[in-house]
């Protein structure tokens, strides 16, 4: 169960035991952050963000700075030599001499995996196109573990853009590996989960999946509601986005029949799929979720660096 020196490109690349190790350390760091305030002193995190990001990029930077490390990199590919035509391979060959660990976000599926072939330091996938987003999955898992105790025997509804949502794809694949999980997938017909992904988790993990277009019908039976936004940037035609963008709006009345211990999550940013009135409901944990993302990324960084084994 040695994570030192490894890349994190896809959640499938780490075992359940390793996942639980990351989550447990993240919760310890959340409980006692001062204990870890100098643990990465002298280490450098390189951030290669070829696509816009707020939470992922800044949470990684916050994670490293909270542990006494330093950060360098770019948040816009146009401010780097990419604008001059430099290849990803050449960028990686240079940057891995400047930093001890790298995190990359890229609009093209598979680019972080390609980059890992050229890197001598660990690379973390910060999101590649609509493919995978493993550290958001870690953020989701640590939130579930903190508020539900164990990640098992849960009925989870995932609502919104299930076709293009990389957070959804990573989360569904990973949660399916835990014991006795059941999923209700809620989306417009045009934004259903890719069939190949659904078939994969059913055949591999024998999970029960129900697909529906109705959010209200399942509220009384679910343990977790994972809302996602309809992603404007993934649509080729703006009229398609406009037609679908308000497909689901969670408000306080929608929660009338929900369980008292329901956990409401969202990877953020939200647009209008969760009404601000819901923010005052104690079951809404999406801002706590974003906060916990810092600590689980702290745990991941130190384990990949080998600072803690």
Image: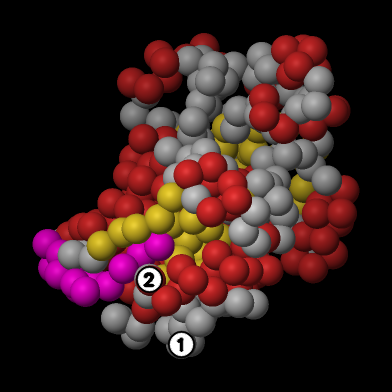
The location of residue 34, given as percent across then percent down, is: 12, 62
Answer above or below: position of 190 versus 76: above
Is 79 on the left or on the right of 30, as rendered? right
Residue 261 sits in which quadrant?
Answer: top left
Answer above or below: position of 290 versus 161: below
Nearest to the eye among marks 2 and 1: give it.
2
Is 36 included in the stretch rendered in magenta? yes
Looking at the picture, tell me which residue is in the foreground, 201 or 48: 48
Residue 155 visible in the picture: no
Furthest residue in direction front, as rendered: 84
Residue 161 sits in which quadrant?
Answer: top right
Secondary structure beneath label 2: loop
Is 96 included in the stretch rendered in magenta? no
Furthest residue in direction left, as rendered: 34
Is 78 on the left or on the right of 293, as rendered? right
Which residue is painted at 72% across and 32% down in the image?
Answer: 234
The location of residue 251, given as percent across then percent down, is: 51, 15
Question: In which quadrant is the C terminus drawn?
Answer: bottom left
The residue that mark 2 highlights is 99
Which residue is painted at 34% across and 29% down in the image?
Answer: 282
Q: Are marks 2 and 1 in contact (CB under 8 Å)?
A: no
Which residue is painted at 46% across and 87% down in the image?
Answer: 2
The location of residue 254, given as percent across then percent down, is: 56, 17
Is 286 on the left or on the right of 195, as rendered? left
Which residue is painted at 54% across and 69% down in the image?
Answer: 92
Answer above or below: position of 263 versus 99: above
Secondary structure beneath label 1: loop
The residue that mark 1 highlights is 2
Identify the magenta region: 34-46
- Ranked by sequence position, the earlier of labels 2 and 1 is 1
Residue 302 visible in the picture: yes
């Amino acid at each position: 169960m040695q994570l030192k020196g490894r890349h994190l490109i896809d959640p499938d690349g780490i075992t359940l035991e390793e996942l639980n190790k990351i989550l447990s350390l993240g919760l310890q760091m959340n409980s006692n952050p001062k204990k870890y305030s100098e643990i990465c002193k002298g280490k450098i995190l390189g951030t290669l963000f070829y696509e816009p990001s707020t939470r992922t990029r800044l949470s990684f930077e916050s994670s490293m700075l909270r542990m006494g490390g330093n950060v360098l990199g770019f948040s816009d590919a146009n401010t780097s030599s990419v604008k001059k035509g430099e290849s990803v391979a050449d960028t990686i060959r240079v940057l891995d001499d400047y930093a001890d660990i790298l995190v990359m976000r890229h609009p093209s599926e598979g680019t972080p995996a390609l980059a890992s072939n050229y890197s001598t330091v660990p690379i973390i996938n910060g999101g590649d196109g609509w493919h995978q987003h493993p550290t958001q999955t870690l953020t989701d898992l640590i939130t579930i573990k903190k508020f539900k105790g164990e990640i098992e025997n849960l009925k989870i509804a995932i609502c919104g853009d299930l076709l293009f949502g990389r957070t959804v794809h990573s989360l569904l694949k990973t949660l399916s590996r835990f014991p006795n999980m059941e999923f209700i997938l809620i989306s417009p017909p045009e934004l259903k989960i890719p069939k190949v992904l659904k078939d994969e988790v059913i055949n591999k993990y024998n999970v029960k999946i129900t697909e529906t277009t109705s959010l209200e019908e399942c509220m009384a039976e679910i343990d977790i509601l994972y809302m996602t936004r309809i992603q404007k940037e993934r649509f080729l035609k703006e009229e398609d986005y406009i037609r679908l963008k308000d497909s689901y709006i969670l408000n306080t009345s929608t929660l009338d029949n929900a369980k008292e211990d329901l956990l409401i999550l969202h990877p953020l940013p939200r647009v209008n799929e969760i009404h601000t009135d819901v923010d005052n409901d104690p079951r809404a944990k999406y801002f706590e979720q974003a906060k916990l993302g810092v600590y689980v990324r702290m745990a991941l960084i130190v384990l990949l660096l080998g600072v803690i084994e």
